[in-house]
Amino acid sequence: MTARKRERITTIINTLLLENAASIQELAKRLSVSEMTVRRDLNILAKDNIVRLMHGAAVLNPGSRPDRRQYAITQQEALNAEEKMLIGQKAASILEQNDIIIIDSGSTTDYLAKAIPYDMPLTVLCFALNILIEIHRKKGCSLTFAGGIFHKNTLMFESPEGVELIRRYRATKAFLSASGIMSRLGVTCSTQYEIESKKASMNSALSKILLADSSKFGRILSAYFADLKDFDTIITDSGIPEEYRKIIDNLGIDLIIV
């Protein structure tokens, strides 16, 4: 999928979130494209059960509607906590001594930070308060922190300088979190300000590892940061839909199920 098409699809989803429904004519005018182009984009969304088409218009499928409440990591930590703990522990088990790693913000990556052995020699870059607190307790870890503006809902720090620091960094492994994973529309997160830090982390690492519980598969949010094929390894729980097991296998990604 081209970047332009992905941008159109994101605009369509955001429009439907705000307005509940929109005609193909209205969407074409808003996007400055032909109605035929809009129909093709909507057909992609309809196949993935994200929208329903009706009489020259589209409505967002209620079953795929993202949660419009503000993301709060304190709430997310309580969801699927056992699965996230097992995912974090498995992620820690694939670390090797003297690895240089990047740990993304998120409730699942928090469990990875907790599970890192106390004395294991690692070099760690992070940019979230909860990860920082966990890593600074580890005797074996050498810590680099990319700071900036503090976002209370995600506990993440973000700034152009922080992103530039991540871009200049080089890591053996980057551990990424996500709020939504779809085969066609990619891997998404909850807020726009997370995108550049996540992209920089992936571009700076030899191995890209996605940590996501099974509830994230088939879900979409508006902040796209990667395609599924961009990851080398995915660690998730046994609830992952069979459809996505096959998709991941076909992409040649190493799937680890806890």
Image (tube, rainbow, N blue to C red):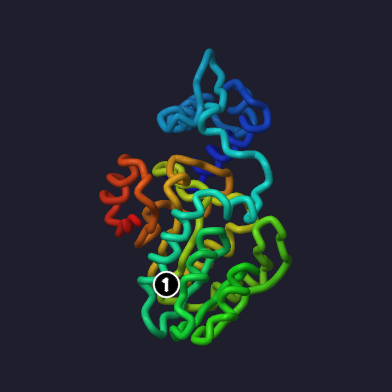
Lateral position of residue 211 relative to residue 72, left or right: left
Q: Quadrant of the C terminus?
A: bottom left
Q: Residue at x 67, y 68 (%)?
A: 160
Q: Residue at x 46, y 85 (%)?
A: 119
Q: Position of residue 153 (x, y in %)?
A: 69, 55
Q: Amino acid at mark 1?
A: Lys
Q: Residue at x 50, y 43 (%)?
A: 6
Q: Position of residue 76 (x, y in %)?
A: 59, 51
**Residue 70 position (above or below residue 254):** above
Q: Position of residue 175 (x, y in %)?
A: 46, 66
Element type at marker 1?
Answer: strand
Q: Which residue is mark 1?
A: 173
Residue 73 or residue 8, whichever sits in front: 73
Lateral position of residue 229 relative to residue 202, left or right: left
Lateral position of residue 257 relative to residue 83, left or right: left
**Residue 56 position (above or below residue 236):** above
* Residue 10: quarter of image: top right
Q: Quadrant of the N terminus?
A: top left
